Image: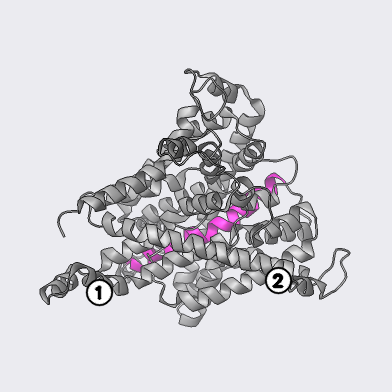
Amino acid sequence: MKRTHWWGRVYLLVVFAVMYTPIVYLMYYSFNSGGAMHDFQSFTLKWYRDVLSDDRLLMIVLNTIVIALLSAAIATILGVMGALAIYYVKQQRAKHVLLALNNVLIVSPDVIIGASFLLLFTIAGIQLGFKSVLLSHIAFSVPIVVLMVLPKLEEMSPTLIDAARDLGAGHWQVLSGVVLPFLAPSIWAGFFMALTYSLDDFAVTFFVTGNGFSTLSVEIYSRARQGISLSINALSTLLFLFTMLLVVGYYVLSQKGGRVYGIGGRK
Amino acid sequence: MMERTWRNWYLVPYGIWLVLFVIAPIVFLLYESFLDMDGHWTLANYEKVLTPIYLKMMAYSFWYAFLITLVSLLIGYPTAYWLTKTKHKQLWLLLLILPMWVNLLLKVYAFLGLFGTYGLANALLQTLGIGARQLLFTDFSFVFVSVYIFIPFMVLPIFNALEELPPSLIDAARDLGASAWTTFRRVVFPLTLSGVKAGCQAVFIPALSLFMITRLVAGNRVITLGTAIEQHFLVTQDWGMGATIAVVLMAAMAVIVVLTGTGRKEGSR
């Protein structure tokens, strides 16, 4: 049990090498003056300059970040309310139904979510663009937050609330002084999850984005369909560094909260 | 009494979300699937789904999803198994999860370079003496890239299941004279089946409806149900047909979830 067989190590090494090759490959060629993802010619920062001087692209990056932050914040509020709502439902059957409905958007494939949201927005007469993308991102992030917060809520000892009540706290005081501080790590973890889901989403956004508005994933897709351009590589290197920052933040928070909940989900 | 009014307040915004974004889209999808392109009621869409073209596409989708799940399992199980035996397993696990945070599109895009005619993969094949070949736009690259994308979703639940396995059970099996392989086959694997199920579900369902990887790496062919839905909604504008395929796909998935999902525990996803 104590030692890993050498072939176990070799196996893991190969798996990790394969996992990281594409990412390293992408970043490596972002410095290639040759203009293609092969035959490294000489070191250049040209592609980074291209990215940073591309106003349209920077606008899209800004859009993506605004959508991610806004949708994650709103989804976190809705998700915490949802978790509290499910927690307070004492009837087992009703609880199961709520949880099942909650999980529908998590298990449904993106294509179907995207298509059905497109239908929804068309029927509701909401114009495709910023609003529809924001609404969809909020919509698919809510269940994730619920799933991150609910287990922590179930863990909470009811005596905590009783104690606060006995000491004369009202509902609002119990919530803001006891329940929310107790849930804080999982709420933050939920927020970060929602943030990464929003930043990472392609398929749903692709359906509801309309003509004038674009997020990074959709933009990368339309550029990648036209072939290879090393400014995408430069952009991906920058994004990778940014994501690492987010991951470290998330990791620190989840370490505080005990364990990493609910990793998985979206493809 | 106070208690009750407060509970209701939490349910209001959450309930609105449930109705608007979970129930309404499903209802609209069902409704749309009975409409033709001019908005008249029809069953033609369902008739069309049963024609050989779509049946074949469905078979393809299931076949590829099955293949992707199988390969992910064959690679993912040993990975999870040996991960649990490393010294700093939380760190290794984090390293495995890390690529999940890289934008999906970028990972797929990387393979356009890696599998290109002059890319690393072909260079490797050449030095091995196999010789360069067309990798992009083949079924091989489609399955490979999909497995690459999905493998963490397979490893994580299996890893968790392995972690929950009491080591004393393995010791007991060994003490009773079972070989390492027998111990694995008769003790470890059956007891981690819940993780395997959760992993297969987490891979199979999204694999069934891929469209972006198909479009970028497998060429511009419409071979899976995911691409067909995208095609109908965004290219040919035949929303009724797209909705019908979506409904059929959802029904198929519900069946899969019911068949495999009974033992799913929280924390395994």
The answer to whether residue B176 is seen in the rendering is yes
- Residue at the image position 28 percent from the left and 54 percent from the top: B83
Q: Which residue is mark 2?
A: B27
Mark 2 or mark 1: name the one nearer the start of the chain. 2
- Residue at the image position 35 percent from the left and 45 percent from the top: A16
Residue A2, image x and y in percent?
A: 14, 56
Residue at the far left: name it: B175
Q: Left or right: where does residue A121 sit relative to residue A59?
A: right
Provide the residue span drawn in magenta: A129-156
The quarter of the picture where the C terminus of chain B appears is bottom left
- Residue at the image position 51 percent from the left and 79 percent from the top: A94
Instruction: Output the chain of dot 2.
Output: B
Q: Nearer the viewer, residue B54 or A215?
A: B54
Q: Left or right: where does residue B183 sit relative to residue A59?
A: left
Q: Left or right: where does residue B37 sit relative to residue A83?
A: right
Residue A179, image x and y in percent?
A: 38, 61
Q: Nearer the viewer, residue A216 or B189?
A: B189
Q: Which residue is mark 1?
A: B187
Looking at the rendered structure, the number of numbered marks drawn on it comes to 2
Judged from the image, the secondary structure of the residue bearing numbered disc 1 is: helix
The answer to whether residue B156 is seen in the rendering is no
- Residue at the image position 35 percent from the left and 65 percent from the top: A168
Q: Amino acid at mark 2?
A: Val
Measured along the vertical axis of the image, is residue A63 above or below residue B30? above
The scheme the figure's colours follow is one colour
Measured along the vertical axis of the image, is residue B117 above or below residue B192? above
Q: Left or right: where does residue B17 sit relative to residue B68?
A: right
Q: CA distance from mark 2 to mark 1?
A: 45 Å
Residue B261, image x and y in percent?
A: 46, 74
Residue A183, image x and y in percent?
A: 38, 58
Q: Amino acid at mark 1?
A: Val
